[in-house]
Image (spheres, coloured by chain):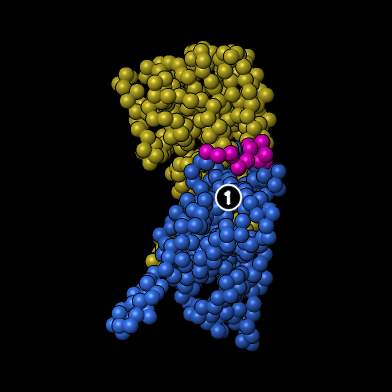
Amino acid sequence: MSHLLDDDDPNMRSLALEEYKTLESTLTHQLDVVFPSLLTPQSETSHLSAILEIKSGVGGSEASLFLGEMLRMYLRLAQLRQWSTKILAKNELDSGGFKDAIVEVNGEGAYDALRWESGVHRVQRVPATESSGRVHTSTVAVIVLPFSNEVSSSEPLYEDKDIKLEVMRARGAGGQHVNKTESAVRLTHIPTGITVSMQDERSQHQNKARAYQVLKARLLDRKLTSDIENRRATRRALIRSADRSEKIRTYNYPQDRVTDHRLGLTMMNLTSVMEGDGLVDFINALQEEHDQTVMEEILLT
Amino acid sequence: MYRNLLATLSASMSRSHASRELKWMRESLCTEFNGTLTPESVKTLEDMVSRRARGEPLQYILGSQPFGPLDLIVRPPTLIPRPETEDWTIRLAGEISPTKASPITMLDLCTGSGCIPLLLNYLWPSGSNHAICVDVSQDALNLAHENAVRCGISVEFANEGSPTSTKSASILLLLDDVLRSNFPERLANLGEPSFDLITANPPYIPLAEYVNLNSTVKMYEDHRALLGDPNHTCHGEGLSFYRAFATQVRRYDLLKDCGMIVLEVGENQSDEVQRLMLNDAKMQRTAVWRDPWGKERVVVAWKSTG
């Protein structure tokens, strides 16, 4: 139709130009959005729920306080996305905040969305306890593990003989002699050396069930990671979220901004991120980035 | 404000465990919309902490104890279900697979809160089992009744007048002293002379050990659920119940031919209880199950060699 753009009739030319613009934008949309979404392979992990492990890093009690706020942020996000949550373990500190926490996030797509949260989160602000008004930097580490309630029909994640179960406290004669409430258990997966301790519940049975749940999530995480690595063995590593020791995001209170270092993206209005709404924007941007990377990979192979 | 409470609790246990107990107490109380305790709850919490600091078992203060997937009511003086018992009951549930087509009858002696038969009943298919539960304490039977109702399991008190109605409820509660040598005649009168499975967590603590028990146990839990030789007989080894039971099993033929006996025992009692099962009860085969702490906790006995 391009010859119509040079038509002698000015009316025809302007009509053609108008249509050209519409077509161009449709084409752009097809190329940028529709085409990639058709090419991007369906996520193999879209059905998985997530287990979120949050641990305070450097910065002492300030890190623990921020951990509590991050925990709230993720619970808010789950609410927005209509995922159900269950706190599996949390170590509250006398001084406020938490040393660590483990949360189960149940729902379609929970793992796929949250997996980008794995890594070191950095907070910069003046701690409430700081009298001189100096800005401190503290960190909180997040690990997101895949988790499924359904029994997978494929190969099992572990064999019973590879699990060592220990009960943590001696009970003397035990049985009727003792009515103590300590019920801590520790699981060790011998081949990988992964250990999980659980003591938040009142019964050993419950602690054992939770410990197995977390252990399964860690083993599934290892399996997924090694699957990805195997697929990329001959290619340069593209995935940027793989390294969990990497600093991924900074929450800067004095400047009221949050910066995602992988995307190079900064958003103002820190409160909106902490309320979950702003976090959705980051997660969507990370998902797009991921889809694009997958596309590039497909095109390069 | 929790700091003082935590300090009070920490006097009798590790600080980290004190903070967990405080958390469990807090979780059992009413909260405002924002998660803070109501003023009444704060008072209750303070009261709970001071009771705990005086040595009362946490389970009695909270009024419940998880037992496998069940959450049972506990209250003084009935024995609080122990994790060792929870462990072997879950194991036992997996060892036998009764079905509705071939249901089993079971006898649980010294039933206490009802934890063993209730958990088995809960874990097995419905209609696959029927249990008679015996205890010497009316308090215990009342509690077992409440627990059955709470777990949605049909339950009745044994009624001498209507011996044939026993199969209508899954759990039948019988008040009696299993040390009475002719006690099994009551079972026959109820129309249940023999069983596929007999379980018991009878009192097994020897007197010499009982006097040295932690006051959290001794002062609050029923001595009738703890003291192995209530009549100060049997050389004080805590085995009165096992001796009486072994004799009754043989004399009244309490176990069906393919049946199984599962008895919780105290530290260092498994050898003698196995001997009683083989020699006195005339069982053909025994085994010992260890608890999660590595102690020999359960003696299992079978009537047939198979």
What residue is drawn where x is 66% and y is 73%?
A59
Secondary structure under the numbered disc 1 in the rendered image: helix
Nearest the camera: B94 or A228?
A: A228
Pinpoint residue A252: horizontal percent, then vertical percent.
57, 79
Side of A85 where A173 appears, left or right: right
Q: Which quadrant: the N terminus of chain A?
A: bottom left
Q: Colour of chain B?
A: yellow
Q: Is residue A160 magenta?
A: yes
In magenta, the rendered stretch is A153-164
Side of B269 where A97 appears, left or right: left
What type is the residue that disc 1 sits on? Answer: Ala
What residue is drawn where x is 60% and y is 78%?
A124
Q: Is residue A194 above or below residue A70?
A: above
Q: Is residue A124 above or below residue B196?
A: below
Residue A131 visible: yes
Pinpoint residue A73: horizontal percent, then vertical percent.
49, 68
Mark 1 — on which chain does it sit? A
Q: Which quadrant: the C terminus of chain A?
A: bottom right
**Residue at the spot of label 1:** A217
Q: Residue furthest left?
A: A11
Pinpoint residue B106: horizontal percent, then vertical percent.
45, 24
Q: Colour of chain A?
A: blue
Q: Residues within 10 Å of mark 1 (few under 14, many from 20)?
A: many
Nearest the camera: A267 or A78?
A: A267
What residue is drawn where x is 34% and y is 23%?
B166
Q: Is residue B241 magenta?
A: no
> Which quadrant of the figure has residue A65?
bottom right
